[in-house]
Amino acid sequence: MRGGLVLLAVTLLLWVWRAADFALIGSYAPAGFVAIGCILMGLGATGGVGIWRFGVRAWGLCLTLIGFVRSAITVALAIDPSVTVHAVEAQTALYHSITAIHLIAGLWLLINPPQLNWPR
């Protein structure tokens, strides 16, 4: 199940990168999201199997919801692109690939959360 732990780490690292990027322009909301994710994983790692599974599934649910929202924004901008030109310009290949990562990783973590195998 190391693949699940790698996926979990990649999603957290992607959000750390996003939080640092947004912090440079003065927005700290992604940093708060990363903090929530780290708190969920930390509590789960120290609290037991049930809490760990809950924390991973909560993180997966957050990623899935973010992916669905980003997909809805893409569809809304395709239907009515007159909203703002900046929003349409932000629809790059990187944006779509990150949205796909959110959806796939979030659903994977919801359905099949990785297990921790170290002694407590």
Image (spheres, rainbow, N blue to C red):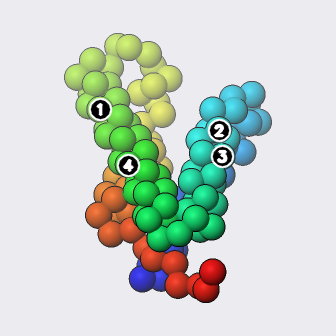
**Nearer to the camera, 90 or 23:** 23
- The reply to whether callout 3 and callout 2 are in contact (CB within 8 Å) is yes
Viewer-side label of 4, 1: 4
Q: CA distance from mark 4 to mark 1?
A: 16 Å
- The reply to whether callout 3 and callout 1 are in contact (CB within 8 Å) is no
Residue 16, compared with residue 27, is above or below; it is below
- The reply to whether callout 4 and callout 3 are in contact (CB within 8 Å) is no
Residue 38 placement (x, y as % from top left)? 63, 54
The kind of residue tagged 1 is Ala
Q: CA distance from mark 2 to mark 1?
A: 23 Å
Numbered label attached to residue 32: 2
Residue 17, compared with residue 19, is above or below; it is below
| Quarter of the figure with the C terminus | bottom right
Residue underneath mark 4:
61
Residue lying at the far left of the rendered structure:
79
Q: Which picture quadrant has residue 104?
A: bottom left
Residue underneath mark 3:
35
Q: Locate residue 27 relative to residue 7 in the image: left or right.
A: right
Residue 26, compared with residue 34, is above or below; it is above
Of the image marks 4 and 3, the number of the one nearer the N terminus: 3
**Nearer to the camera, 100 or 77:** 100
Residue 104, compared with residue 114, is above or below; it is above
The kind of residue tagged 4 is Leu
